[in-house]
Image (spheres, rainbow, N blue to C red):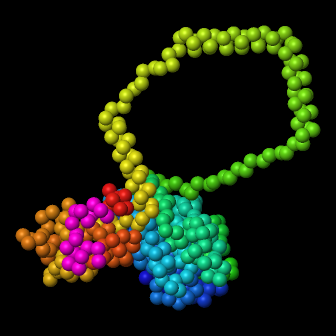
Amino acid sequence: FYKFCMANRKLKNFEFANHSEKGKKKEINTDQVVFFESPNGSVFLVCQDNNDKEVENGPASLASQRIRYYLENEFVVNPVNALYNALVYTNGFLFEYGRKTEGFDNTGVHCACILIRDNQAYYSVFGNTSIYFFNGNKTFLLAKGEDIPEISSDEADVKNEPEVNALPLLGLSKTIKPEINIDPLVPLNSDILLMCTSGFYEKVSLKNIQKILADPMPVQTKVYRFIDMASLAGGEENVSVQLISFYNLDHQARAFKPAEKRTIRKATTKKKSAGTTTQTLSSTIQELKEKVSKPGLKHLLIAIAAIVLGYMFYDLFIHDPMPPVKVRSEQAVNDTNEIAEAAEQESIQSRYTIPGDTLYQVRAGDNWSRIYTRFGVCSWFIRSHPDNTGRFDNDDNPVAGRQITIPLIYSAREEFNPDFFRDFSLEQTGSRCENANQDFVDAFKARYELR
């Protein structure tokens, strides 16, 4: 979607343009430059992988598909959590897909993501991608992933090499913790966001980036200019760029935080010989003897001794070593327990990919068998979901036109439930789902320490 060719669209509050060009040393261009609307907001993606094979679903393509699938089917109230969950879900899916699919090499995906909701931007980056912000006068680096060298299948086994799995790319490790800006970027009219891969930002200087962004030329033309500049600079890598220009905004003030610059300080030590240390110690002792012999220093030492004695008297006879202890209220204890439980659940969720619920509009002719075929979830789990109370007819059958909640954590299909799908196979729930009940759910949650 919007791959290889120029895409340009004008919407209510922003205009965007993008393009992707194959690098000189690449046989094919597998980059994905994507835009789509979702219930969670407008989504922009620039995804890149190191795959040189012409396949229908390469890593970058699969990553953009999974991010889109989650954000189109799962509405999350907090946009930070929406983008976070989509990336965690996509990472888990890619990892399992790469582990189980023969010939699916170089699964790591570099990716820049922007989610715009209520004309405010949330973003995250992985690998060789960056996001810049232009406020009309100056260009700021908002986010930049770690520059990752290309690793071919001949150099490392991506699926088994621990050092490779530790790299900050989508799909290389089972779990990730994406960094999302908690404070949204609030743009003003004419502000511009730039998403790009290393094939662009390594060849085009910040000065030239700002020169093009400040020019009143159309957004589409700016993208063409960027692609040409990177290509003329001798770009070996694919060049993928996406621009978002804002207008018709009601914001009164701009708000954003540039990427922080990290400084690494290294401690230095000097090794001294034994002879030097002995000489230094002797010299120090002699200097102390000479100083103590001075009258002024004697008076100072006497004063210090008096202070020490006074403190000892206070500590022995005045200070109460067992002061009254403030007892926490029952509410404070409960709050502490809730925080501990939340931390424990966050630790559990970091070990597993826990899918959320999805909404489904019942269609004419739908029955429980058709719904199971679509989602792999037994009817008991759906009927017992609190959000579905009163959503069925007198016989507890689905009603066409009504919206119901599907708890995908109980799905027997791997694409929806990558970590737990085996627990809900027909071998476990029964060929007619006759084993699906509250005891089954309680045993499942106890097995994985889930609430």
Percent across and percent down for residue 129 are 56, 70
Residue 430 image-quadrant placement: bottom left
Residue 430 sits inside the magenta stretch: yes
Q: Is residue 426 above or below residue 192?
A: below
Q: How many marks?
A: 0
The segment highlighted magenta reads: 427-444
Percent across and percent down for residue 166 are 58, 66
Residue 236 vs residue 97, the one in the foreground: 97
In the picture, the quarter occupied by the C terminus is bottom left
Residue 225 vs residue 375, the one in the foreground: 375
Residue drawn at x 33%, y 59% as measured from the top left: 446
Residue 238 sits inside the magenta stretch: no
Residue 41 lies left or right of residue 283; in this view the side is left
Q: Is residue 350 above or below residue 202?
A: above
Residue 44 vs residue 159, the one in the foreground: 159
Q: Is residue 346 above or below residue 92?
A: above
Residue 328 visible in rendering:
yes
Residue 246 image-quadrant placement: bottom left
Residue drawn at x 49%, y 61% as measured from the top left: 177
